[in-house]
Image: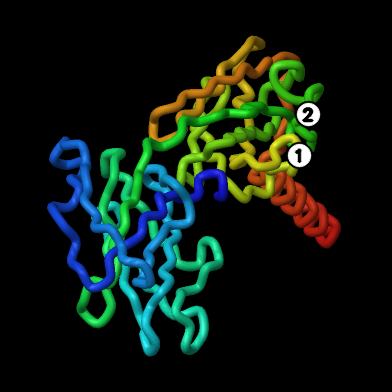
Amino acid sequence: MFSRAARAVAVTGLALLPLLGPTAGAAADGRTPSAAAAPSPSGGPHLEFDWDEVEVGGWAAVGITGMPAGWTVVTVTSPALEKPIRLTPERKGASHSNSLPGVNRGDVRGDILPGVYPATAASGGRTVATAQLRVIPQAPAQIRRFVAGPKGGTLGSTDSTPEVTVRPGGEIVVLLADENGAEEENSLTVTSKAFEEPLTIRTQSSDDPGCKCDDGATVYAGHTTLRDDIPPGTYALTVVSHDGEKTSTAQLVVAGEPVTHYRPWLIGGAVVVASAGAVGLVRRRRRR
């Protein structure tokens, strides 16, 4: 999700010098992270990130330039990263790694405090460059739409909550669009007294109508069947997102006669009874 792409400050590293000072503290110790990085002489390896800053739980893309001939692998480590990032030459003999955005990327830990963290590039067991990774708080949710409507509709302005009225026992589709969807949050749970049980809505759902009004947002969708024994009224739909930080509510109007559902076991039983009657009729005819 590009809107949540990792962004980190591009700071030049020092060739062949170890990192100075202690690493930044993690969230577990409750301290504000800090970092020290040495200046870089001209012409030495240069370690930099693609963006000025990165969100907690996001991702960071990094590259290196100015490497000497014959280098093969550079490993970038940081207390802010879940695991090291491995860099290789863009092509044989190149002094830089692949510079395409997102190619050399790593996940940023979700359990750290915002702050500045050191990053170290090592090759052949030696530190070749250092930089700083600036981590900011996760962006708040921006819920663009939270609507529901009859399954088969388009979830537009006239066929979704609160303008539309649905019948008890009817099938509905629920959709939530978030302009700042949380990283790795691919499903959400919607609760309502109108449901038999909580509904799970997911990204990449076949229930997503693909409205252009949701372009650029993370879209969650799913469908469920309403209880057929609920009285007419307005029922709240509630979903909690962003790892529990955002609660969204929509109103669903229910009225009219319940939708009739034919249960397979009733149809099967009718067939069995009819078959038994036919057999009895044949037997009676044979006795005549």
Quarter in which the C terminus is drawn: bottom right
**Figure quadrant of residue 225:** top right
Rendering coords of residue 184 (x, y %): 45, 49
Numbered circles on residues, count:
2
Residue 241 in the image: above or below residue 81: above
Find disc 1 in the rendering and name its residue: 211
- Give the residue at x 22% y 42%: 33
| Spatial CA span between label 1 and label 2 | 8 Å
Viewer-side residue, 278 vs 202: 202
Circle 1/circle 2 CB separation < 8 Å: yes
Check disc 2 and give the amino acid type. Gly
Outermost residue on the top side: it is 233
Does residue 197 appear anywhere in the picture?
no
Q: Nearer the viewer, residue 258 or 100?
A: 100
- 277 to 159, vertically: above or below: below
Residue drawn at the location 53% of the way across and 37% of the way down: 180
Q: For residue 114, which quarter of the picture?
A: top left
Residue 45 in the image, given as x and y percentages of width and height: 36, 71
Q: Secondary structure at mark 1?
A: loop
Q: Which residue is mark 2?
A: 156
Crowding at mark 2 (Cα within 10 Å: few <14, some 14-19, many 20+): some
* Residue 244 left/right relative to 78: right
